[in-house]
Image (cartoon, grey):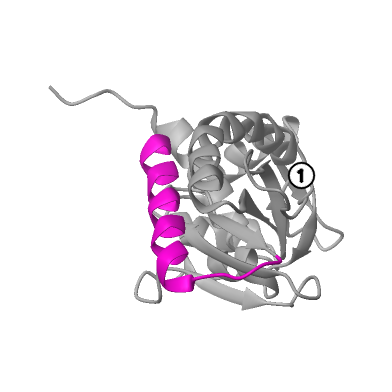
Amino acid sequence: MATETSQTLDRGLHVLRVLAETQSGLTVTELAERLEVNRTVVYRLVATLEQHALVRRDAKGRLHVGLGVLHLASAVQPVLREIAMPVLRQLAETSGFTAHLTVADGDEALALAVVEPSWTDFHVAYRVGARHPLAQGAAGKAILLGRDPAVARYAVTAGELQAGAKGIAAPVRGVDGLEASVGIVTLGALDVDKVGPQVAAAAGEVAARLA
């Protein structure tokens, strides 16, 4: 027997998804065309979402995702950390390098969880909450790789964020609504052929746990 669903809720979620994918915003008419529904329906959906700060209008009346979405997103971050920590701990202990989970936050990469190996004399201290452009560093570049399923399994960088630092990161693929990567960073020697598959496997494990 088919599961009953709420058409109104489904449409409301579709509104948020469409607006999130459109940086310049949409008019009510444009949104109605994207959703293939009557403008009256869109007016009701938008009015409800505005009451919860999930949709906002700019000075020209164009619709955008509202700041209320940020509050919902912040509540998800502890869940992501909890799920990823055992995988990061295993990666850090196996590789001997600092392991991290990084998520996309606009045009920036945000370090959400970090685990340092327990048995090494020296390792990189990587701060939770650290940010950098998506186009710099292995973690951000891996997130960008995740937008194209046909490209490489992981990204490798050297010295892009810190002199002498080397990193490998792999995208967390197949989790709707999440752009993230799992990676390692070190100041020492790095065997990419050995560690790269370990990082990719860890990213796959995080994806599996979130599925």
| Residue closest to the far right | 59
Q: Which residues are magenta?
A: 187-211
- 147 lies above or below 9: below
Residue 177: % across, % down: 51, 48
The answer to which of 88 and 208 lies nearer the viewer is 88
Residue 44: % across, % down: 60, 37
- 66 lies above or below 155: above
Which residue bears the numbered disc 1? 128
- 49 lies above or below 172: above
Residue shown at the point (65%, 47%) measured from the top left: 120
- Figure quadrant of the C terminus: top left
The answer to which of 58 and 117 lies nearer the viewer is 117
User: Of helix, strand and loop, which one carries label 1?
Assistant: loop
- Figure quadrant of the N terminus: top left
- 10 lies above or below 99: above
Q: Would residue 81 appear left or right of 3 to someone viewing this image?
A: right
Q: Would residue 148 appear left or right of 73 to someone viewing this image?
A: left
Number of callouts: 1
Residue shown at the point (34%, 75%) measured from the top left: 150
| Residue closest to the far left | 1
The answer to which of 29 and 168 lies nearer the viewer is 168
The answer to which of 13 and 201 lies nearer the viewer is 201
Q: Main secondary structure of the magenta part?
A: helix
Residue 78: which quarter of the image?
top right
Residue 130: % across, % down: 80, 53
Q: Amino acid at mark 1?
A: Val
Q: Residues within 10 Å of mark 1 (few under 14, many from 20)?
A: some
